[in-house]
Amino acid sequence: MGKWWEREPIRFECQADCFKCCVKPGIVHFDREDIRNAADFLKTTPAEFKKTYLTRDEGEWILEVGEEGEPCTFLTDQGCDIHEGKPKQCSSYPFWRENMDSKFMWRLVGGFCPGIDIGPMVPIETIKNFLKKFTH
Ligand code: SF4
Ligand code: SF4
């Protein structure tokens, strides 16, 4: 049978100067690899990165976004300050399992993310890779 997105084309193009998903209240998860990548990018150590930016929650390292209306700590006027070292959760958005489960969910996320349903077609393999990348 396959997934609905294997049967119909999916289009997506992140919009310049949008950053809505970096302002929306929520949690950004950093696994061990994400911490290492971000720390390397900022030329610091994983321990220092965790101490400076992250908190421990139920056995995981997280960054809370939206507390008291504040955007993500790493958001600047030019976009994500750790763009090349950003975690898998961010680099795979909006191709998260919960968003891809049904066409209804994809449309719902499209009401928030202006990049959905415009731009080039996203190959099925690319979507599969995103889904493998961020498995929360
Ligand atoms: S909400 Fe969508 S279009 Fe806007 S920055 Fe996030 S992924 Fe890009
Ligand atoms: S880490 Fe970067 S991409 Fe992820 S929410 Fe923060 S500013 Fe946005």
Image (cartoon, rainbow, N blue to C red):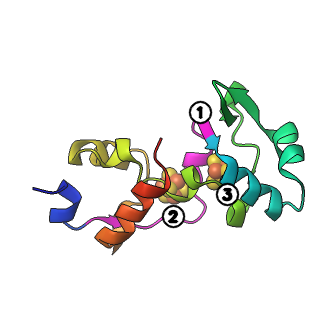
Label 2, secondary structure: give it.
loop
Q: Quadrant of the N terminus?
A: bottom left
Residue found at the very far left of the displayed protein = 1
Q: Residue 124 is drawn in which quadrant?
A: bottom left
Whether residue 59 is visible to the viewer of this picture, yes or no, is yes
* The residue carrying mark 2 has its beta carbon less than 8 Å from ligand 1: yes
Q: Residue 53 is drawn in which quadrant?
A: top right
Q: Nearer the viewer, mark 2 or mark 1?
A: 1
* The residue carrying mark 3 has its beta carbon less than 8 Å from ligand 2: yes
Residues in magenta, as a range:
10-28
Whether residue 77 is visible to the viewer of this picture, yes or no, is no
Looking at marks 3 and 1 on the same chain, the residue that comes earlier in the sequence is marked by: 1
* Mark 1 residue type: Pro
Residue 79 coordinates in the image, percent (x, y): 69, 59
Q: Is residue 31 above or below residue 3?
A: above
* Callout 2 touching callout 3 (CB < 8 Å): no
Mark 1, Cα crowd under 10 Å, few <14 / some 14-19 / many 20+, is some
How far apart in space, not on screen, are marks 2 and 3 (Cα)? 17 Å
Circle 1 residue:
25
* The residue carrying mark 1 has its beta carbon less than 8 Å from ligand 2: no
Residue 56 coordinates in the image, percent (x, y): 73, 29
Circle 3 residue:
86
Circle 2 residue:
15
Q: Is residue 3 above or below residue 73?
A: below
